[in-house]
Image (cartoon, coloured by chain):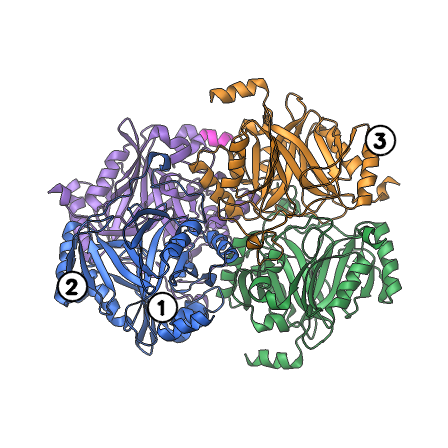
Chain colours: A blue, B purple, C green, D orange
């Protein structure tokens, strides 16, 4: 009976994300100098990084590319058995690609796409960060010391993808991977955005409508501070060093996140997250459905001024029109 | 094979807690006037309360009693089927008591004790808070408006119980209810304290050694702000109004919680939680084991001065010796 | 020799301000319920209030009136002799009105206007707040306990007046009362705004250009928290209770103030101040001159989105056009 | 008539301080790497530094020395005439030493000691920091960009000296230099500590009783953040990098300062100041007198645990007993 069907607990977390950047070294400098991240490896075209409270070898891979955007998104299963179950389900959808042997920081992974075409993978085997003795913290739940450079982010939080069809991608994540719908924006029944999670956080991934129905775009990647004031500190630092702040510190209504958005030099939008928003522990959570007409001034920014139009419309890679416009500005 | 045994996901959350107070009305005034909580019902000997972001009818019951302490602790299962499975497991341990019909705010519940004798219950059916139209927030994920009195807490967070045998109680929660061990203090292999959870939080419940092996005591109950500064605000308010602050705002090493401890007028210790500490999403989490000799100055207070001896030794109800001492002070 | 002329130290502080309100009781409720202020006296048409760290009997008088706006602004001299000296200087300008016997909370005061016609007074004798024993704080530099209602402001900070001629009013304050120019906005040499002070704060008073050269308007009155997070707390409270937030928490470039603007029910703009900005102790301070073209995005909001046009153009009382527009909205 | 005697406004601010360090380079590394200060000059035995919102060429000089302690303390007069007046007054006390030609960062200065023998100077001519174009901030009231290293302090705040006779030194500063008494600790009429200022801040200098009546010691030097959360950030950073935190973030009752104390590698105590405490603008300020018996738990730490005994008893240079004890620890 559908009503009593139990939840799936087979996906545990967002494990890592690959960003594409046309300005690899400048992108790396942004994450290290200002956000205090650490380079843990380099390959021919990619740089691997982690934040100081990320437990794994890396959570961010930046790969040199013609255009900005997302390379792939990796999910960790809750167990080897869970991994097998999910691969079976993915294969049924026809969106499966196949196993890869692994990469720096993790073992074999199964690759697939969501309906919009974003490349994803699911895996079980990960490498934990192997900290040098001198960088070990006496705080045993912290994998390495707080760095002295920048306003250091603590860990990877979530990703937001733009899609030609938010409903289709949301349904895929729910039906195939066991995500739960937490909040959603609808406009006359049409889904404009979904916030979904496998954990007690409101989202590990969100999908937003790409206004021209372009496929495969990144809206933003988010790293976490957990301290509201740190957003002001990093905003002050970035402003003084000419990094583009698209949205200054602000409180989302949806997810209650204390948020801020900047553009890294490669062009991708990066969110910095200043608290934890709210936590969902109710196992029978009724999704919060926002009618688009109630979103402005409540759902987008509970306390804060309106978001610029670019936040609503623009993902990476930019369409050629947008790219020309950015060039001119 | 034990190594590949999968996790149990049958308990979802701490649903509510019953506190005992010899000064019922003063205890209620503390939670309403200073912490901004709302009385949602009263029965003959009990008062039912909620915080403004608690979704259920109540998360705190204060019951008049000769002595301070904990009445019972209620867990919500993840589904009706999960409830049945857990009741079966509890019954196998011989610690089951039986079903009750329900109480204000929830339906039928199965009662049991942990090995130390703390009374608990597990349930599925809950009543959601039925908010008056005038108290409805435009923030759709907030069940009622932020109150204008006190420095209002947002939701129930966790409970910490003192026990004659932390290892036995920890094992019971893990084996019977599916909790995961997150952090632990050991002294030459003897377990002095455990922080365990069913969610991504470090704990919904902790167990600490009662130094005289007395049974059934409460160490503290915790409500959540999620904003570090709010601890200073409420500490300033409480100090000016002569409420006992046992531990001023401080950062625990264990759990990384930004914390503070006060005594409500009935004598129970209340923790106020100022951030989210850290979040565990790794499905193969290796418990953080602290050797007791490394705890002072790192595990107890990462940034902050030593806790008073009372914090380590004293739960409610007080032993007769402690009660006499408190009287004199 | 002008270069070596010494500073005048005859005015010490902004002592109190009288606001005009067409909705007296609703205005009083705003300041008491949400900002935690206390009513210390009532007269036939006025209510007298103080914040919990204001040392004097009152710092705010709200007087019933047909229209919103400012009644008068009171300055305290640094000594009886300083008072005499300043009255002499004022009389030379032809803007003096004469002595009044005093009011609730202070003794005799000399009344005058600035060139734009805003009514002011200067005085020496003040009544300190006479706190009830039960409201006395153990914190000896705090005149009364922190209140348990609202997010309580701590003290009066500054006032900002709109004027037909900012340069003329700035010069009057500097030449006649001994204010120092701290920051200024100029547009092709025309003064659009001035921030001036007699203390180490950047301003006790600012003057801004009224775009239609209307006279005698109030831009805003400001109370102080000194804690950035408190602006988010009070904004969350006010948003949930339908008070108009014109500018959410934001950082001014000019004065570096962490600021926020709301409209009290009577229609006046109230600023809430979340830190101390920066402090000027250099006795040879070179005024910071902003060219209007550099103000947007740096001088107005260093970290924050643009101010709404209303902030730049609208003071109280509203012109009849503006009032009609507000009515419609 | 004494009662009507007017205040002296001849001293404007604490201009700079010279610290002595037996570990010059390690001391410099502490201030640059962790507190984000900048080295602006070096001489044979000294290093000159500034914080990013210090307007002058330097506010801190660290000089190599056998022992920790304070070299000299420099005050800036409000005008050249004020400088002459104060030198005349100092000379009357017999504590004058004479003029020096100047140093890196300032012109001629008159040197003297207070009764306890601490070396001081008073001056008018200062050099402003000459910022490189690339380091200029668009925030025109900020002399250079916010640095990306450490948790950067904003400006010099105050100094606290230990003395054999707090009353004598307090009286000297009041009578000869025009300081005002803001707060004081007395024990049966004996002055144990004084907080005095020439500005609206509660103190630019404090004097505390050296328990063995040793002369000439430094209690601490203080730099300012103005943001409470920054103390937690820097405490977290320093703890992880093994810098001694003597007092973690805490709120003083006296001055209401949100404070924290660490020991720089040379051995001197450094305070970091997280807000502005409270501001005094009342020109007839009645000093707040604390009876020593009311200080613990109210005057020392309004919200926070007791200070360690070392904070009350130990200045630099250490007495030989203390030094031995530190060696052993």
Residue at left offset 43%, top offset 59%:
A259
Q: Is residue D246 left or right of residue D8?
A: left
Q: Specify the subunit that label 2 lies on.
A: A
Q: Specify the subunit that label 3 lies on.
A: D
Q: Which mark is residue A315?
A: 1
Relative to B240, is C91 above or below?
Answer: below
Same-chain check, marks 2 and 3: no
| Callout 1–callout 3 Cβ contact below 8 Å | no
Crowd around label 1: few <14 · some 14–19 · many ≥20 (10 Å): many
Residue A255: quadrant of the picture:
bottom left
Residue B111 percent location from the top left of the image: 24, 47
Q: Specify the subunit that label 1 lies on.
A: A
Alpha-carbon span between mark 1 and mark 3 = 74 Å
Q: Which residues are magenta?
A: B323-329
Where's the N terminus of chain B, which quadrant? top left
**Farthest left residue in view:** B1
Residue at left offset 66%, top offset 56%:
C157
Magenta-colored segment: predominant secondary structure: helix
**The residue tagged with tag 1: helix, strand or loop?**
loop
Q: Which mark is residue D92?
A: 3
């Amino acid at each position: 009976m559908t009503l009593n069907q139990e939840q799936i607990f087979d996906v545990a977390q967002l494990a890592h994300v690959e960003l594409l950047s046309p300005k690899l070294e400048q992108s790396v400098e942004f994450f290290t100098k200002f956000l205090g991240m650490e380079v843990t490896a380099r390959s021919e075209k990619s740089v691997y990084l982690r934040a100081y409270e990320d437990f794994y070898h890396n959570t961010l891979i930046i790969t040199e590319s013609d255009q900005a955007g997302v390379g792939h998104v990796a999910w960790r299963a809750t167990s080897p058995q869970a991994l097998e179950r999910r691969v079976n389900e993915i294969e049924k959808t026809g969106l499966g690609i196949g196993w890869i042997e692994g990469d720096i920081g993790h073992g074999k992974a199964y690759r697939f796409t969501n309906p919009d075409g974003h490349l994803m993978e699911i895996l079980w085997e990960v490498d934990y960060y192997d900290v040098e003795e001198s960088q070990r913290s006496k705080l045993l739940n912290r994998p390495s010391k707080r760095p002295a450079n920048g306003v250091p982010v603590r860990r990877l939080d979530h990703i937001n993808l733009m899609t030609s069809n938010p409903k289709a991608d949301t349904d895929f994540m729910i039906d195939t991977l066991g995500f739960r719908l937490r909040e959603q924006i609808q406009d006359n029944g049409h889904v404009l955005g979904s916030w979904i999670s496998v954990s007690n956080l409101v989202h590990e991934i969100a999908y937003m409508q790409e206004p021209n129905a372009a496929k495969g775009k990144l809206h933003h990647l988010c790293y976490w501070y957990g301290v509201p004031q740190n957003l002001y500190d990093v905003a002050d630092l970035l402003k003084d060093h000419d990094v583009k702040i698209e949205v200054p510190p602000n409180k989302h209504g949806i997810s209650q996140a204390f948020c801020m958005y900047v553009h890294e030099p490669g062009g991708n939008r990066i969110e910095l997250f200043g608290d934890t928003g709210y936590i969902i522990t109710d196992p029978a959570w009724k999704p919060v459905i926002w009618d688009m007409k109630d979103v402005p001034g409540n759902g987008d920014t509970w306390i804060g001024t309106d978001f610029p139009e670019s936040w609503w419309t623009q993902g990476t890679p930019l369409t050629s029109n947008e790219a020309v416009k950015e060039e001119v500005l």
